[in-house]
Amino acid sequence: GENVEQHPSTLSVQEGDSAVIKCTYSDSASNYFPWYKQELGKRPQLIIDIRSNVGEKKDQRIAVTLNKTAKHFSLHITETQPEDSAVYFCASKGGTSYGKLTFGQGTILTVHP
Amino acid sequence: NAGVTQTPKFQVLKTGQSMTLQCAQDMNHEYMSWYRQDPGMGLRLIHYSVGAGITDQGEVPNGYNVSRSTTEDFPLRLLSAAPSQTSVYFCASSYSGGNNEKLFFGSGTQLSVL
């Protein structure tokens, strides 16, 4: 089955700095790569996603890049703010496996004021 | 719309007890799934369903049963609770059409097995 590795497990940055979280996946048939943010005690929520036919996608301060050849994708957060502090999960989905995601281990991001 | 509703929010069980975690969604989503979240291990898929009457195993199905008699409900049953099942459980649903594959999560159930 699919395996998703996520790094780093913890990331600490100063407010205003950029943060990058990286994930690799094993199944070359995977075609959908979402990122979820989970604040303390809350449910995970989708913040951005990308499909295998696109190399990059941006949404304000957040961007995701995908390298299909290398089978890795990354989350980029610019101009970080304290409210960006949370756990971030990458995930992948293969083919027509709707509603069935394989998640990475998570990254605890702390943004210091 | 309430979205995805999970009950209970907290539960403490003794080893060997059984219980059912309830999950209901009012968005008419075809796809529903159960994940467990453990520190340092992300979210792992337990069971999922692509429609009423259809279920399949995920990555960590042992010790759990599911059924999907209606589109709205997808309960998760712990047959004989074990300490290894101490975890936070999330139910999720998603739409089946087009490019919208967003998972809508419930608020979670924190389960402790003593």
Image (cartoon, rainbow, N blue to C red):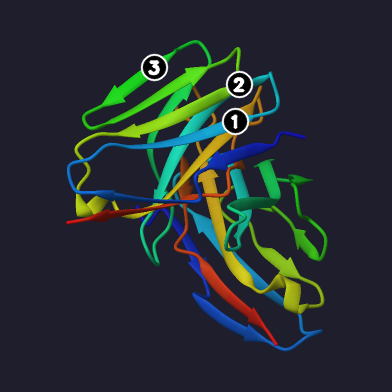
Quick check: B41 above or below B14?
above
Q: Say which of B32 and B39 sits in front.
A: B39
Mark 1 surroundings within 10 Å by alpha-carbon count, few (fewer than 14), some (14 through 19), many (20 or more): many
> Are circles 2 and 1 on residues that touch, CB within 8 Å?
yes
**Which mark sits nearer the N-terminus, 1 or 3?**
1
Q: Is residue B103 visible?
A: yes
Mark 3 surroundings within 10 Å by alpha-carbon count, few (fewer than 14), some (14 through 19), many (20 or more): some
Label 2 to label 1: alpha-carbon separation = 6 Å
Three-letter amino acid code of the residue under disc 1:
Thr
The residue indicated by pointer 1 is: A24
The residue indicated by pointer 3 is: A56
Q: Quadrant of the C terminus of chain B?
A: bottom right
Image position of A16 (left or right of A33): left
- Across and down, in percent, residue A98 comes to 61, 32
Three-letter amino acid code of the residue under disc 3:
Glu
- Across and down, in percent, residue B26 comes to 45, 51
The secondary element bearing badge 1 is classed as: strand
Quick check: B85 above or below B55?
below
Q: Which callout, 1 or 3, points to the residue nearer the camera?
A: 1
Q: Are marks 2 and 1 on the same chain?
A: yes
Three-letter amino acid code of the residue under disc 2:
Lys
Label 3 to label 2: alpha-carbon separation = 14 Å
